[in-house]
Image: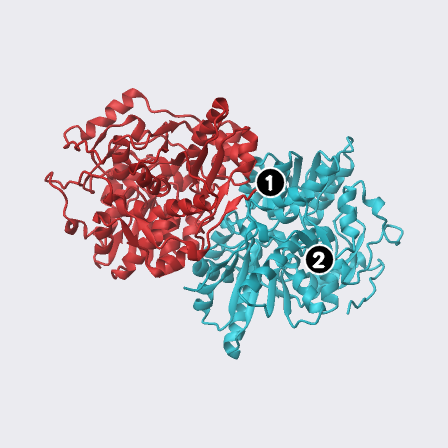
Chain colours: A red, B cyan
Amino acid sequence: MEIKKILLTENEMPRQWYNILADIKMNPPLGPDGKPVSPEALTPVFPMNLIEQEVSSERWINIPEEVLRIYNIWRPSPMVRALSLEKALGTPAKIYFKNESVSPPGSHKPNTAVPQAYYNKAFGIKKITTETGAGQWGSALAFACSQFGIECKVFMVRISFDQKPYRKSMMAAWGSNCIASPSTETRAGRQALEKDPDTPGSLGIAISEAIEAAVTDETGQTRYSLGSVLNHVLLHQTIIGLEAKKQMEKVGEYPDVIIGCAGGGSNFAGLALPFVYDKLNGKEIKIYPVEPAACPTITRAPFVYDHGDAAGYTPLIPMHSLGHNFMPAPIHAGGLRYHGMAPIVSQLASEEIIEAKAVTQLDAYKAGVAFAKAEGIIPAPETNHALACVIDEANKAKEEGKEKTILFNLSGHGLLDLAAYDKYFSGEMKDFSLSNEELIKSEEVFADYPKPALLKSR
Amino acid sequence: MEIKKILLTENEMPRQWYNILADIKMNPPLGPDGKPVSPEALTPVFPMNLIEQEVSSERWINIPEEVLRIYNIWRPSPMVRALSLEKALGTPAKIYFKNESVSPPGSHKPNTAVPQAYYNKAFGIKKITTETGAGQWGSALAFACSQFGIECKVFMVRISFDQKPYRKSMMAAWGSNCIASPSTETRAGRQALEKDPDTPGSLGIAISEAIEAAVTDETGQTRYSLGSVLNHVLLHQTIIGLEAKKQMEKVGEYPDVIIGCAGGGSNFAGLALPFVYDKLNGKEIKIYPVEPAACPTITRAPFVYDHGDAAGYTPLIPMHSLGHNFMPAPIHAGGLRYHGMAPIVSQLASEEIIEAKAVTQLDAYKAGVAFAKAEGIIPAPETNHALACVIDEANKAKEEGKEKTILFNLSGHGLLDLAAYDKYFSGEMKDFSLSNEELIKSEEVFADYPKPALLKSR
């Protein structure tokens, strides 16, 4: 019988994260004066130990023992051969996936939530604020904070807060407090509500709220935590790809194609970066981040300097951006409703080391349902976007009669997203694609900002 | 670092189920004439290959290759050391659990749903009907039927249907049809609605509906499937305990105490029966099924002959029963709201080989939240009942200063039960315990039935 799950023991789990900053060139983040931001300038927002990781150029960074201990709750995650999906598609391609849905919060997010909580705790921080879109990140940080006895406050994008009441309950089960964003608790939130009292919210606004709540806290013992985009977040996620490489080796395979959905970029990068390292060193491999057609940052938006949040609290960061006050359509994949893209992912795209794809919501859900029927697991709506690309690649392999090894990241399960599946089944789900007019308008906001240099890493 | 998860490879997965009927004595099921039921009499309800398993006395029964292939989606399931819970409790006890929540439907139920769908398919059956309480069983059968291309219709107990709308969505994702019970589609359902139009429903009524829908189907290609209670269901679930024994061996341990929640008895028995075999052969071991105080079949109800369903469609089976038309209080653990108990579990209890415990709903949720905070996983409400007993045992070990190895079955996760957790956190959750008056009244229904003989297996 063919082996379905390729497992690693806890002893085989990687002991270091891979830091791609050792291997590529990057534009620096800029302050309000247009000059590179000093690490010290970030200390009201993040603890210094995480800032050091953010700017480190060491290729390998040790994973603390206490983090490994908590990773062991669900890691190493299985790499699974999608034998039934292959059969259903009649494809000659081999399809493998990393099953990141096995963590207690149900996604890849705790890979960084746990070390972030750890480093905050080590730095003496008592409370962490954050934003969440679909709720995957908020619940992951709630879980991580419960492991370290840290208080946690989550600003959840209104549309997801309403669509997914049980994400709040999960956070409550782990002892965290979750409120809808925009809220009246922050200046950024009140401004957004004044502008549009019925706003569905956005990750950009929620980030502003969470940063403001952290830096205005009078105890000085509160910091902010971000679930994607930043270098140290992507660093922590590389555990996925590092495990995947070991697992691929175990079955004597190497992927021809790597696929992950991309909102802020962390689950995609977590799987892809260790393979990007190989590509930088000459390996032939296709690497596809997949984004929603409703929020197509890499595929349609320019590579610019822009703020990471709606209120402009963050430094200017070099990334593909639809503009920091872009309001994405209310697609049922909250984790992909972000105006920007991780600087590392943006840089790799600008160098054509990776090649982004965009898919529509209905195509994504269609792929997700085909996967659920074949493989049993009901994927997160975000993951469905990756799956649309996987099935496309598998069908291409069939047409071309080519054997091919596809590896994708099953970033999370959809058990808290079943209301969205109901809409899909009932035919109520709408499709959204960004119009050219919206795109042009969205670019006004960063028109006068500095432009990132076009760098070549190889 | 201490190992947290004890894993088996797919090749190490047991290739046979353990059939305890080879090792204990049982009273036979009786027909309306008071005489033992012949296997042939059951053919309108079940396919013959499953009836043969129901009555087999072979100790070891081969698991078909096609079933193993689908088990591989999530099995072997991890055995996990609850190191953080041990630490939180400050207990000298070692606490291990089988994590059955890792299956796509999120519980132990597919362990039998998959072989049942397989044997029905092998027998040429095109459609399966069933009932479900909390929805764990219905979604497991929906998953299994989707793997074999069989149509599936689920009658879901009204109170759970209303409390847990997303269980329906899961079944829809796998292509099954789920309706609330009592329904107007069956005579049994219509009778129940006439008696009480606002009834919350019960597993007993839903079973009647599903059996009626199967046996009245004119194509002759529909059969009924039960998710607990019956011998062949418990047989399939022994994969849990058989894996656990191998995993215990790997770490050089053997449990002193085995704990599982018990509604119909299948997750408890699945873990316990392979250890009962050892106990029958002289091993010292405590084995505790844990039931809700609101529906205390083993701890309070007598060992009698009674019907498995409300309408009396099933044969009389020897079991602890609160009466086949008992209406359990609306506790948030739908899988434990059953008037009876598996004949095998009832027989073992009557021989004092196992010793049942009962816990209240609030104690169960308290234990579940303590577990979620320590171990990350949010348990199913049913599992919380086992956890209340686990924590009690761990605390006893602390008081007595005794080292002790506890093994329990984490039968499922609670991600589809978060509304119930919300009620617990808000203080709205009520406690229920069966009163003596209710108990005495419940016994009227089987007062005139034959009585099972008191048999001794050792």
> Tags 1 and 2 in contact by the CB under 8 Å rule?
no
Question: Is disc 2 placed on a helix, strand or loop?
Answer: loop
Task: Tell me, yes or no, if residue B182 can be seen here.
Answer: no
Q: Which mark is residue B341?
A: 2
Q: Quadrant of residue B283?
A: bottom right
Front-lying residue, B433 or B344: B344
Task: Tell me, yes or no, if residue A146 can be seen here.
Answer: yes
What quarter of the picture does the C terminus of chain A occupy? top left
**Label 1 belongs to which residue?**
B143
Give the residue at x 23% y 30%: A303
* Residue A418, image x, y percentages: 50, 39
Give the residue at x 39% y 36%: A260
The amino acid sitting under disc 1 is: Phe
* Crowd tier of the residue under label 2, counting other residues whose Cα lies within 10 Å: few below 14, some 14–19, many 20 or above: many
Front-lying residue, B295 or B104: B104
Letter of the chain that mark 1 sits on in the rendering: B
Would residue A320 be found to the left or right of residue A148 on screen?
Answer: left
The amino acid sitting under disc 2 is: Met
